[in-house]
């Protein structure tokens, strides 16, 4: 049997039910038998009914997030394993659309270090300046749906970009209770608290911490794509790791200079 999680509706219902008990108990113990006692009983009844109403809104998720969070994990791990066998060891870099005539944002996984030089259109990049694997990011279908259905507009202003990241994580995708993003110089940091897909993150980092920075999950790759398109610059993921005891994920990105 699955019990409702402690979401805000459930917490409010508990508080109201407890308050109803306190009010009715106070009326019984004081035993004034006057208008004040009657109001206490009526107030307790109102709190109880309101608590029941809030409890009906606190049903658990229709899909078990423990299972849902694991859906993209093995695909990401497999790609990282193949890249490791090919000697590709760099961190994922996101190339914004419009750069080098590209019509969509791409993910480039370099053999070692990538300095932002021109990349061909082929999936396997070989050359003296850059070599690696060029693919669409795992968020590509999600980003396409947001553009088509939500008419996503990515701003160029950094403050507006931070606000958009928070809206995407909390209000649109609803994958986190809180999303904070900041930047200092060329470093962008995104922190997701109460991350609902935390089990998938932990499964990937348990396999190897390299998985999250070599082939980020759809959520992190969406944030990287939004920053890359908004700033018009290449973004590289430096670190992404979940906390051990809390459902919190912190990701650090580097913005390539022009």
Image (spheres, rainbow, N blue to C red):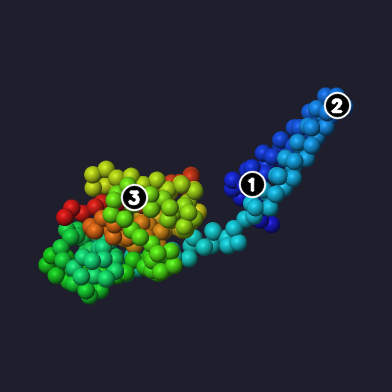
Is label 3 or label 1 in front? 3
Q: Residue at x 76, y 32 (%)?
A: 23
Residue at the left extreme of this rendering: 128
- Compute the Cα span from label 3 to label 1: 33 Å
User: Disc 2 vs disc 3: Cβ atoms closer than 8 Å?
Assistant: no
Residue tagged 2:
34
In the image, is residue 193 above or below residue 65?
above
Residue 10 tag number = 1
Across and down, in percent, residue 206 comes to 42, 55
Earlier residue among tags 3 and 1: 1
Instruction: Give whichever of discs 1 and 2 has the lower sequence position.
Output: 1
Q: Position of residue 176 (x, y in %)?
A: 47, 51
**Is 54 situated above or below 118?**
above
* Residue 208 visible, this angle: no
Between 175 and 164, the residue placed more toward the observer is 164
User: What residue is pinned by disc 3?
Assistant: 160
Q: CA distance from mark 1 to mark 2?
A: 34 Å
Q: Which residue shows up at 70% across the image and 49% down it?
A: 53
> Helix, strand, or loop for circle 1?
helix
* Circle 3 Cα neighbour tier, 10 Å, few/some/many (<14 / 14–19 / ≥20): few
- State the residue at coordinates (27%, 71%): 103
Instruction: Tell me the element at label 2.
Output: loop
| Residue 14 as seen in the image, left or right of residue 181 | right
Q: Position of residue 17 (x, y in %)?
A: 72, 40
Contact check, label 3 and label 1, Cβ < 8 Å = no
Instruction: Specify the quadrant that holds the N terminus.
Output: bottom right
């Amino acid at each position: 049997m699955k019990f409702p999680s402690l979401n805000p509706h459930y917490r409010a219902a508990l508080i109201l039910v407890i308050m109803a008990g306190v009010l009715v108990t106070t009326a019984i113990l004081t035993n004034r038998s006057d208008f004040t006692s009657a109001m206490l009983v009526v107030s307790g009844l109102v709190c109880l009914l309101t608590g029941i109403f809030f409890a009906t809104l606190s049903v658990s998720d229709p899909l078990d997030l423990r299972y849902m969070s694991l859906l993209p994990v093995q695909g990401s791990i497999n790609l990282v394993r193949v890249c490791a066998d090919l000697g590709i060891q760099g961190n994922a870099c996101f190339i914004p659309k419009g750069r080098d005539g590209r019509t969509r944002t791409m993910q480039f996984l370099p053999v070692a270090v990538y300095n932002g030089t021109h990349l061909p259109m082929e999936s396997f990049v070989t050359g003296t300046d850059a070599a690696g694997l060029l693919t669409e990011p795992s968020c590509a279908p999600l980003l396409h749906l947001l553009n088509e259905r939500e008419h996503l507009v990515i701003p160029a202003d950094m403050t507006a970009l931070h606000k958009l990241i928070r809206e995407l994580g909390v209000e649109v995708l609803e994958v986190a209770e809180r999303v904070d993003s900041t930047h200092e110089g060329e470093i962008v940091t995104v922190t997701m608290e109460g991350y609902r897909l935390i089990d998938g993150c932990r499964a990937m980092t348990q396999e190897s911490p390299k998985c999250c920075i070599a082939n980020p999950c759809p959520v992190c790759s969406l944030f990287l794509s939004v920053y890359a398109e908004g700033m018009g610059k290449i973004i590289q993921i430096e670190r992404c790791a979940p906390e051990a005891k809390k459902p919190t994920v912190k990701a650090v990105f580097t913005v390539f200079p022009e």
